[in-house]
Image (cartoon, rainbow, N blue to C red):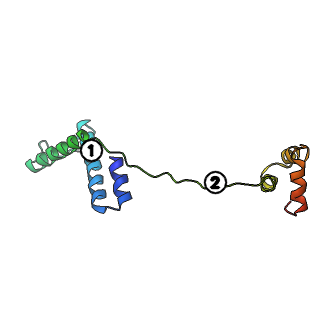
């Protein structure tokens, strides 16, 4: 039933959304009645004929919904843009993000990364 609600929301179909909510509420009500959870709240010994007819309609509606397999809604996955950083940009970003000892170990003490850190300082970015 959640798939029906999601599909109605994605489509912007207000009528389908209301119908899906109604089916969910009917399912909840039928489940509570069948488990006896509402017995304490029942004020009459016998249901009136209108209530019996409505209960039968809800049960048929739920059985029909259970027999019909739900079609999964394909939700497009947003694609994150790929960000390409230059080594200098990575050095500057990590200067702000890493603890100073970790940054110093990675960028100043490492002979391969030291020229990149020197270039970042020369450009005034650090």
Residue 101 location in percent, x, y? Answer: 87, 46
Asked if labels 1 and 2 touch by Cβ distance under 8 angstroms, the answer is: no
Whole-angstrom CA distance, mark 2 to mark 1, is 45 Å
2 or 1: tag closer to the N-terminus: 1
Instruction: Give left or right: position of 90 versus 120.
Output: left
Q: How many marks?
A: 2
Q: Secondary structure at mark 1?
A: helix
Furthest-top residue in view? 35
Residue at image location 91% in from the left, 61% down from the top: 122
Residue 39 location in percent, x, y? Answer: 23, 40
Q: Secondary structure at mark 2?
A: loop
Q: Which residue is mark 2?
A: 82
Residue 69 location in percent, x, y? Answer: 28, 41
Residue at image location 17% in from the left, 43% down from the top: 60
Crowding near the residue tagged with mark 2, few <14, some 14–19, many ≥20 C-alpha atoms within 10 Å: few
Compared to residue 39, the image places residue 92 above or below, namely below
């Amino acid at each position: 039933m959640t798939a029906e609600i999601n599909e109605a929301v994605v489509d912007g179909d207000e009528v389908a959304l209301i119908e899906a909510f109604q089916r969910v509420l009917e399912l909840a009500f039928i489940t509570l009645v069948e488990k006896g959870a509402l017995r304490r709240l029942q004020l009459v010994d016998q249901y009136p004929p209108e209530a019996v007819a409505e209960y039968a309609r809800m049960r048929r509606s739920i059985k029909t919904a259970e027999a019909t397999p739900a079609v999964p809604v394909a939700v497009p996955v947003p694609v994150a843009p790929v960000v390409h950083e230059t080594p200098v940009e990575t050095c500057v970003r990590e200067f702000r993000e890493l603890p100073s000892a970790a940054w110093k170990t990675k960028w100043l003490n490492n002979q391969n990364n030291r020229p990149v850190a020197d270039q970042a300082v020369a450009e005034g970015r650090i």
